[in-house]
Image: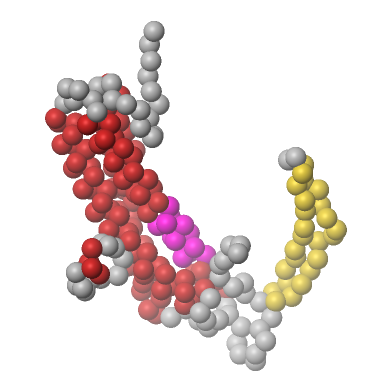
């Protein structure tokens, strides 16, 4: 197992080892230097390739995090819907706003990772942002040691240009609208749900 990422560019690197026991970190041995160099006689990758890989890694981190946040928001919305079902006299406006928010977050999810119903209907669909990123990381990270292709840069530009608006929609949906609805559910005396801190006064 372990993490993965792009190959480093040729050069001299160092590695060190340490152990941590009860929060106390102690070095093990001295740092060791080693050289990374191409095994063939081809031209080594320029630093610009690593820079592109690092940019892609930052974008991938944000997209994967946004997708996970949207999934978590959908879970909170589902729990809130069930809590409102168990709350007598709940304002119908609260339910309608929650349903509208569910639709919004689902659309955000589909923008990030694709509509899961499309393959079942055997319909063609444009690649999702995560699929586009997968094509970049599979090729520019570990699939090749050569220069970044024009197609890979084009895929990056598409994801970067679309993701900003999607992220702002998600931030508004989760940090503002979902929080407002959870506060409304709390005021209505709904059962506790994930993401809410209950209020109590003796």
Is 142 contained in the magenta span? no
Residue 44 at least partly seen: yes
What residue sits 59% from the left and 73% below the top?
7
Residue 53 location in percent, x, y?
Answer: 51, 69
What residue sits 31% from the left and 66% below the top?
128
Would residue 35 be found to the left or right of residue 168 on screen?
Answer: right
Q: Is residue 176 above or below residue 27?
A: above
Residue 66 location in percent, x, y?
Answer: 38, 52
Is 63 contained in the magenta span? yes
Q: Is residue 148 above or below residue 191?
A: below
Residue 82 location in percent, x, y?
Answer: 26, 35
Would residue 180 be found to the left or right of residue 19 on screen?
Answer: left
Count of marks, rendered view: 0
* 22 or 126: nearer the viewer: 22
The quarter in which the C terminus is drawn is: top left
Residue 176 at least partly seen: no
Q: Quadrant of residue 78?
A: top left
* 8 or 104: nearer the viewer: 104
Of all residues, the one furthest to the right in this rendering is: 29
Q: Which residues are magenta?
A: 54-65
């Amino acid at each position: 197992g372990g993490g993965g990422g792009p190959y480093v560019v040729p050069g001299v690197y160092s590695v060190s080892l340490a152990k941590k026991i009860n929060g106390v970190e102690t070095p093990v041995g001295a740092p060791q230097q080693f050289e990374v160099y191409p095994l063939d006689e081809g031209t080594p990758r320029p630093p610009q390739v690593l820079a592109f890989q690092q940019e892609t890694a930052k974008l991938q981190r944000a997209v994967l995090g946004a997708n996970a946040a949207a999934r978590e928001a959908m879970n909170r919305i589902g729990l809130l819907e069930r809590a409102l079902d168990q709350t007598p006299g709940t304002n119908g406006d609260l339910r309608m706003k929650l349903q509208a928010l569910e639709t919004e977050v689902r659309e955000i999810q589909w923008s990030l990772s694709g509509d899961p119903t499309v393959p079942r209907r055997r319909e063609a669909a444009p690649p999702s942002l995560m699929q586009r990123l997968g094509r970049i990381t599979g090729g520019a990270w570990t699939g090749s040691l050569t220069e970044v292709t024009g197609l890979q840069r084009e895929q990056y530009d598409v994801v970067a240009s679309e993701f900003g608006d999607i992220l702002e929609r998600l931030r508004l949906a989760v940090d503002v609208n979902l929080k407002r609805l959870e506060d409304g559910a709390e005021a209505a005396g709904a059962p506790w749900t994930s993401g809410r801190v209950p209020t109590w006064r003796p």
